[in-house]
Image (spheres, rainbow, N blue to C red):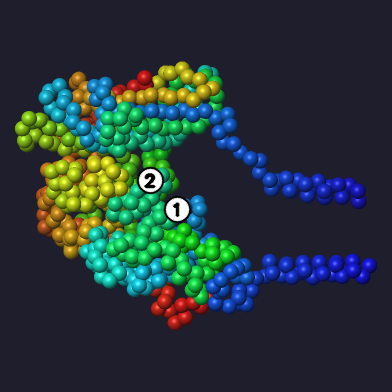
Amino acid sequence: MRYLSAFLILALVGWAASCKKDPVNPSAGEKNLTLNFKAQFDGQALPMFSDVVVSNEESFQLQTLNFFLSYIEIQKENGDWVTIDSSAYVNFSNLVDVSDAESGVNLSYSLAEAGNFTAIRFGLGVAPDLNAMDPADFSSATALGDAGNYWTAWDSYIFTRTEGKIDTLPNASGGEISFLYHSGVDGMYQQKSFSKAFNLGQDVDLNFTIDIKEVFYKAGQEIPIADNNVSHSGDSSTADYAIVKTIITNMGQALELQ
Amino acid sequence: MFKKSLLYLSLGLGSLVLLETACDPKPEDIGPISPTVGSLDSIPYTPVAYDYPEINGLPAMEEPSDNRATEAGVKLGRYLFYEKALSIDNSISCASCHKQEKAFTDGNAVGIGVGGVLGTRNSMSLINVGYNWKQNSQHNFNWDGKFASLEEQVLAPVEHPLEMMNNWEEVMERLKAHPHYPRMFRQAFGISQIDEMSKELAAKALAQFLRTLNSADSEYDRDEWVPFEYMSEAAQRGKLLFLGDALGSASTKDAECAHCHSFTRDAAIFARNSFSNNAIDSVNSFTAFNDNGLGGITGSVVDNGRFREVSLRNLGLTAPYMHDGRFATLEEVLDHYTDHTSASRGPNVANELSTAPELPHLTLQEKQDIIAFLHALTDTSYVNKAEWADPFLQVDPWAE
C-alpha cells in the first residue's frame, strides 16, 4: 500500500510536471546570419525605374528584378553542410530610391549553429524537387506559395524575373523597347558556391552583389533586347529558351560575394 | 460534529452542482433573449471549430492565428454582414454592395452609400476573398491594397463617408443594446461582460464569415475535375489562348492573360494577388493618374496607377469591370487589352501587357473564344446557398 501510494504520488507529480512548459528563449545562444543582396550597374547601386546609359549610348532601365534561391547552406570547418533555408526569394522591385538600392535586400536567419564556417552555397532558381511541387503545397508566407510565381504552361516556378526597357535613341523619340524575361524550367537551375571564412560566434553579414551590366551587356554574351524583347523560357530547342538561359547563367556569374 | 457534517454535505452538494453545470450545459434553458446589461456568464460558451469544406481547385484556407473560425463566429459574422444597424441611418448593410446573386458585387460601376451617395471604386466580389491574404504582405485587400487583413478591411466601410457614414462607437452601442447580439458575441468569443463587445470582435466575426465564401464549381472546374464533363469547344480554344505557350512548346497565339491571372490545378484562383497598371489610363508621368491606386497607399510613385489584379472567377456575374467600373461588358475589356496596352500609355504599364507580341493581333473569333473561357469560370452554385443568405429573411432569424 505504501509503494502504491508512493507510485500514485510520483505519477501525479509527473503528470503535473508534464503539463508545465519550460520557458523557451528562442534567441538564447543564437546568432544572426544576414545575406545582403545589392543590385548594381557597372559597380553603382541600381534603383528600379532609373535610367542608366550604357557604353553604346543605349539607355537601360530595370523595373523588376527578383529571383528564387534554393537550399541555402553553409559549410562547417569539418566539411559538413548545414541547410539554413530550403527556399528564399530576393525581390528588388520596391527599391526605387538610390538609398534603398544601396541598402539592398536582406535575408536574415537566427542560427543555433556556432563555430567556424568556410563557405556558403545555394541554387539560383527553384531546385527540381521543389519545382515538382505546386503553390497549393506551400503556405502563403513563402514565395513558393504564391501562384503568381508559378507558370502553369510549363509546370514550373518562375526562377528569375528581369523586366524593364531600353531606349536605343535616348536623344530622340521612337527608340523605346520594353523587355520581359522570365526564366523557369528545371534545366535553368544554377548552383552557386562561394568560399568565405566566418565565425558564427557573433552576428555575421555576407554581402552579395549582382551587376546587371554583366547580365545584359556581358562581352560575348550580350542580350539582344531589340531583336527579342520577351521570353518566358519554353522548350529547350527554342530561341526563347536560349535567351533566358543566357540571362540566368549570366546572373549566376554576376553574383559575387564581397 | 454536526457542523462538520453539514460543511461536508454542503461541499459535496456544491461540487455536484458545479459538476452538473460544467459538464452538462443546457442551452435550451438559456432562452433566445440575452441580457443587455452586465454578465453573460450564464450563456454557455462551447466553441466548435468551423470545418472548411474541401473544394477541388482551391487550396486550404489560411487564417490568422488569433482568429480561428468557429461555427458561432461565422454565424455572428453572417448576421453582422446583413445588419443594417451598421450604417448611420439603418439603411444599408455590407450586403447592399455585396449581393449574393452577383457573386457579392452590386452591378454598379461604383459602390452606392447611405442616401445614394456614389463611391469611387467598384464593389469587389467576395467569393474566395480569403485567398487574397498573403502572410507577410501589407497590401492584400481592396483595389488599392490598403488593408493587410480582412479583420482590418471590414472596419473601414462603417466609417467611410461615402459608404455607411457611421462610427463604430455608435454601432457597438446599438449591438450591445440588442436583444440577441450580446448572446451571439458570447457564443462566438466567450466574453463575460457585455462591455467586452468590441469593434475588433465584430471585425473578427465578419472576417470569419467572409473566409467561408469559397466556391469553385464552374464549367472550367467540372472540365478539370469531373470525368467526361468538358467545357465548350470555344471555351477550350479560349483557355489555350489565355494560357498560351501550352503543352511544352511555344503556341502560335498567346494572349498572355495567365501572367497576372495565374492559376494552377490546385490553386485555381485566376489571380496572383498582385498589383499592376493595366494601361486603362494613358498618362505621361507617374504623377498624372486620376487615381493613384496602390501608390496612394505605399507612397511610392512607381506604384501610382497600379490596382489589384482581381480573380477572373464569376465574371459573368460581376459586371461592370475595372476599379472604377468603366467597362460594361467583357467585349469592352478584351478590346482594351488588344488595343490600348502599349508602353507609351504610361511609365509603369505592366510589362506582361506591353511586351505581349500577339495580344494586339487577336482576331474577333479569338477574342470571343477567350470570352467563352471567361464565362466558363462563372460559378452559380452558391447564388441561393442558404448558409450565405440574408438571415433576416428567415421566418425566425433569431432561432437557436
Instruction: Name which residue lies at 15% across and 61% down.
Output: B331
**Residue A216 in picture, x, y percent from top left:** 21, 27
Q: Is residue B364 visible?
A: yes
User: Which three-letter amino acid code belongs to the residue tagged 1?
Assistant: Glu
**Residue A133 in picture, x, y percent from top left:** 40, 44
- Helix or strand or loop: what does disc 2 sit on? loop
Vertical relation: B256 (above or below) A35: below
**In this figure, which residue is indicated by the disc labeled 2?**
B137
Report crowding for label 1: few under 14, some 14 to 19, many 20 or more residues within 10 A (C-alpha): some
Q: Nearer the viewer, residue A55 or B142?
A: B142
User: Which three-letter amino acid code belongs to the residue tagged 2?
Assistant: Ser
**Residue A74 in picture, x, y percent from top left:** 47, 25
**In this figure, which residue is indicated by the disc labeled 1?**
B62
Report crowding for label 2: few under 14, some 14 to 19, many 20 or more residues within 10 A (C-alpha): few
Vertical relation: B213 (above or below) A211: below
Instruction: Name which residue lies at 39% across and 63% down.
Output: B167
Viewer-nearest of discs 1 and 2 = 2
Give the letter of the chain under mark 1. Answer: B
